[in-house]
Image (spheres, helix red, strand yellow):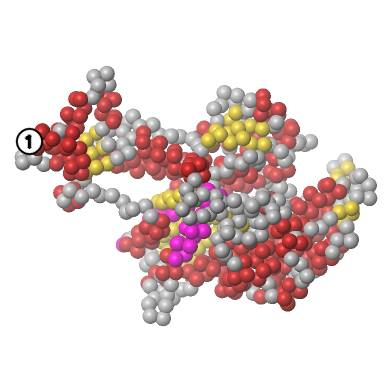
Amino acid sequence: ASLSQRNGKAASRGTLVRSSRPSLRNIVKAPSIRLSKSAPPLERGLSRRVSVSRGSGFSSMGSISEAQLESNRPSMDRRPSWILGSDIEVKILEANPILEAFGNARTVRNDNSSRFGKYIELFFSQKGSLIGATIETYLLEKVRLIHCEEGERNYHIFYEIMDGASEDELKEYLLDGYEKEDFKIINQSGTMDRRDCVDDQEEFDNLIESMSLLQFYPDQVRDITRVSVSCMHALNLTFTAPSEDESDLDDANPHLQKFLSLMGLERKDLHDTICFYEILIAGRDKQRRNQSKANAEKGMEAFIKSIYNAMFTYLVDTINQRISIQSSKSSEQSASIGILDIFGFESFQTNSLEQLMINYCNEAMQQLFNAVVFKSMKEEYDREGIDSSFISFPDNQDALDAIDNKGTSVLSILNDMSFAPGTNDEKFVSNLYQRMDPKSTRFIANPLHQGKRMFVINHYAGPVEYSTEKWIEKNKDEVPRAMVKLLESSSNSFVKMLALILEVEGDPNGSLNSSLSSSISRKRNQKTVAKQFSSQLMKLRTKIGDTTPYFVRCIKPNQQLTPDNYCHKVVLDQLKSLGVMEAVRVSRSGFSKSYTHEEFTRRYQVLLPGKVRAASDREGASKKCKIIVNESLSMMSTNISKEEREKGIQLG
């Protein structure tokens, strides 16, 4: 333990100067309090970082954050100065139901888990008024559209439409006569309900209201709903196989005409796009070839993911247009508060490229967390005059380098191989084994792993085994030009807009950074998913590094979401994956307990009652502490050096 002599009045009164109790509400309020008390404008941003494991309860954090805004909402009787004359906080709050409907889903741990990362930044004027915000998103989980694990649900929007749409709306969207069980996008996991008692019908009503408050026009709402329903019909489409190497749309499938009608497409155009592909002969002449039934099914799945992802991009960009700082107020910006909701560390029975990038993000955030914790410890020790040179700082830079580093790393090799002629997963993994350092303690690929085309990364939270199946395909994430042309041929102007989004330069999961109409001429570069994510993560780390961060960890006591049920294994797994155990290790490497001299004396005077009583009338708390410490050290084993003894206890 370190004994801390606090300076000033607090020390003279014998009180301990501690931070407020680490409750969720206190952490939520802290940045706002700092803003309100800052009398010149803040020079640094305030970033409230929220790091949660997947499905571990960020919705609770979001509710409290919203309540903090809600408590400051203007009323007829009282209009707080920080939002005087503005309804921007209303729009920011109403963005949440929209993002949750299209980007959240039920998982094993949480019924309202964000399946994408997001960073929300709130901007304030010099007077502390909220003047705007931006939302940046990362890695929407598109694979969920095609496959859901048992006990999970797909995105909320599909269930909300089925339960919340009126009879007239069901007819308009060609859903009359259908039940939720009739759609593969809903029924594949066998899970339809939510355990948190949230009603999908009410959520659909809230969604429509939120879109109205954010000034989505009725035609926009209808178009967004039509495309969502189109994805439901699309996954139900089937194909026939006239021959082993040929495929055709199954005209007997009732979902086909409904999909075509909702998307404004022609049957021939869809058939030519999905059931055929083009190749270049001698680099000039195009030749059309048949797709097999299996490849046509994969092509349809890729088409669904592209459509939904483009729609999600459109939603985020439209929300940003509604909540961004108005040009007339851009000169007033002085400070900001950011809220980062990132993916939690993942380790499943089968881990793929998605898990590697998610865990890469967590490695980067853990490095920041370690640096913040260590820096605060070091500053306190320096103030107290305590030697901390022996404390080792846990650095996971070698893990980050093994994942993403110029030259030799998993993602750099993957990017190199993704567009190499004739490349495939087998060639990629062979190249990976050859180029990675065999002596690395972070990257491990023994003969057993190599036989399965797998490898292991030793993360801060523990080792994770990764399968390299379909990594090249996932990393390229190409939207064939033919699919873009198919969307462009639609009679629906909104569907045509989705085609433009797929061609826009930059990250398809993020904001378009300008109006859609001005983005038409900009074409998307040949970027891999890994490159896009690495670029986003680099910018995010820079942004967070320039702020004052706060950290929140959300822990679920059990998988069943039931009260009075504490599962030690579930909690321990979360403590490891959230980096809490690593933080405890950092704290324990130094002096994990701090006392005022008075507290220490009261607690430990029983060890030396005679000497302390003898000094009680003449000496103050500081003198008593020295007596206790010196006597305790002298009683230790003579086999322990003085230097080692003083590492265990120091008097500040």
Magenta-colored span: 39-67
Residue 455, relative to residue 538: is it above or below? Answer: above
Q: In the image, what residue occupies the spot 78% across and 65% down?
A: 263
Q: Residues within 10 Å of mark 1 (few under 14, many from 20)?
A: few
Residue 124 in sight: yes
Q: Going 73% across and 61% down the picture, which residue do you hit? A: 181
Q: Write down the quadrant of residue 230 in the picture.
A: bottom right
Q: Residue furthest right?
A: 242
User: For the residue labelled by badge 1, is the local secondary structure a helix, a strand or a loop?
Assistant: helix
Residue at 53% x, 54% y is 561
Which residue occupies the extreme bottom position in the image? 76
Q: Point out residue 180 in the picture as x, y percentages from the top left corner.
A: 72, 63
Horizontally, residue 400 falls left or right of residue 546, namely right
- Residue 207 horizontal side relative to residue 632, left or right: right
Instruction: State which quarter of the image contains the N terminus.
Output: top left
Q: Is residue 518 visible?
A: no
Q: Residue furthest left?
A: 618
Image: 277 above or below 318: above
Image quadrant assignment for residue 192: bottom right
| Above/below status of 142 relative to 156 | above
What residue is rendered at 42% in x and 78% in y?
A: 75
Q: State the image quarter where residue 260 is shown.
A: bottom right
In percent of width and height, residue 41 lies at: 36, 60
In magenta stretch: residue 55: yes
Q: Report the quarter where the C terminus lies.
A: top left
Q: Is residue 32 left or right of residue 94?
A: left
The total number of labels drawn is 1
Residue 402: percent from left, percent from top: 57, 33
Q: Amino acid at mark 1?
A: Ala
Which residue occupies the foreground of this view, 528 or 569?
569
User: Is residue 395 covered in magenta?
Assistant: no
Reading the image, the residue beneath label 1 is 614
